[in-house]
Image (tube, grey):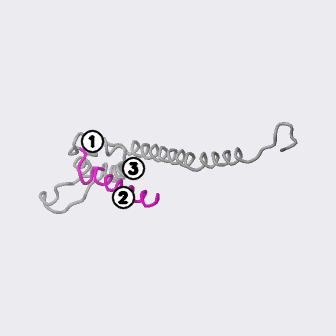
Amino acid sequence: SDIRIASTLQIGLLAIGSLFNGFIVRLEDLPTYFSWLPYIMLSFYGFAGVIVNELRDFSIPCSATELECGVRTGDQVLKLLSYDRIDVFVCATALIVLILLFRVASMVDFYYRYIKVSRLEIVGSLSDSDTPDSSGLGK
């Protein structure tokens, strides 16, 4: 059924999105033929926007020695994840654009699957029925 196929596709897309959003595999370490993949995923812009918003100009307190606290600022974490050139407002704008794009695509799909098909069925059923002749007297 359509619901089962949609669920299967959603799981696959979420797995790809979480793998290539830059947290598991850094953006710099992606092969060139996959380098475009994070930029079409909703999960990338959501994750990157939250991480950059929370860690930019953030200081991580550490009372241990230098070796135990290798990362002391959020900017160092962002550099490690290759998120140091990402802007929060670009992520928010990209999320809004992608959401609107998917919404419009679903509305177009709904129209062609249900509205246009039902209109064609109604028109087809009207043409099959007996219609009065041009004199208006019937048959």
Q: Is residue 96 left or right of residue 137?
A: left
Q: Earlier in the sequence, mark 1 or mark 2?
A: 2
Residue type highlighted by circle 3: Leu
Tell me the distance, in whole angstroms, between the alpha carbons under discs 3 and 1: 15 Å
Q: Is residue 101 left or right of residue 10?
A: right
Find the residue positioned furthest to the bottom. 64
User: Where is residue 136 drawn, in percent x and y?
Assistant: 86, 40
Residue type highlighted by circle 1: Ser
Residue type highlighted by circle 2: Ile
Residue occupied by mark 1:
35
Q: Which mark is residue 42?
A: 3
Q: Is residue 41 left or right of residue 80?
A: right
Residue 8 colored in magenta in the image: yes
Q: Earlier in the sequence, mark 3 or mark 1?
A: 1
User: Where is residue 57 drawn, in percent x and y?
Assistant: 30, 49
Tell me the distance, in whole angstroms, between the alpha carbons under discs 1 and 2: 21 Å
Tell me the distance, in whole angstroms, between the alpha carbons under discs 2 and 3: 14 Å
Between residues 99 and 116, which one lies in front from this camera angle?
116
How busy is the neighbourhood of tag 2: few (under 14 within 10 Å), some, or many (20 plus)? few
Between residues 80 and 131, which one lies in front from this camera angle?
131
Secondary structure state at the residue bearing disc 2: helix
User: Where is residue 28 drawn, in percent x and y?
Assistant: 22, 43
Q: Is residue 119 left or right of residue 8?
A: right
Q: Which mark is residue 93?
A: none
Span of residues in magenta: 1-27
Which is closer to the viewer, label 1 or label 2? 2
Q: Which quadrant of the figure contains the C terminus?
A: top right
Characterize the magenta stretch by its predominant secondary structure.
helix
User: Where is residue 71 drawn, in percent x and y?
Assistant: 20, 54
Secondary structure state at the residue bearing disc 1: loop
Residue occupied by mark 2:
11
